[in-house]
Image (cartoon, rainbow, N blue to C red):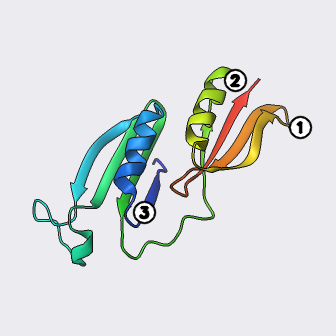
Amino acid sequence: MQLSNYLFFTTDCEPALSFYTQCGLGRVTELMRHGEAGMPVRNEAMRGRVMHARFEGPGVLFYASDNDDAEPMRGSAHILTMDSPAQTETLFGQLAAGGIITTALGLQPWGTFYGKLTDRFGVQWMLNCPV
């Protein structure tokens, strides 16, 4: 068994996945579009948008798609356990660009280097680095 997140966007799936690739999290390894290769189109506005994508990188696996009935993301966050404070700072800064920092990155009372943010696509991230 393996648990993976599935992110639902309305129209920003492809730019979000491109952003995560630029941040160094991994890359899209599977992509299907609404209305291509026999894939159904429930709403013409969705034609050509991402119907299903698989995103993978070292220690990272999640899925994502555009859905015209998607609700704003809430109540869940990706948590990344990092190997070094420097790596954590770099990725945190990249993911925070255009987003909102909800917990500043720093040494926390529980003893780890930690920060939380919501990126510009509405996805919550928690970066945690044991020190």
Residue 25: horizontal and vertical position, in percent?
Answer: 46, 34
Q: Which residue is mark 2?
A: 85
Element type at marker 1? loop
Tell which circle, 3 or 1, labels the residue nearer the N-terminal end: 3
Element type at marker 2? helix
In the image, what residue occupies the spot 43% across and 42% down?
A: 19
Residue 41: horizontal and vertical position, in percent?
Answer: 20, 73
Residue 84 appears in the picture as rendered? no
Q: Which residue is mark 3?
A: 9
What distance separates the C-alpha of mark 2 from that of mark 3?
31 Å
Tell which circle, 2 or 3, labels the residue nearer the N-terminal end: 3
Amino acid at the residue labelled 2:
Pro
What distance separates the C-alpha of mark 2 from that of mark 1?
16 Å
Q: Which residue is mark 1?
A: 109
Task: Give the number of the disc on residue 41.
Answer: none
Label 1 packing within 10 angstroms: few (<14), some (14-19), many (20+) = few
In the image, what residue occupies the spot 21% across and 68% down?
A: 47
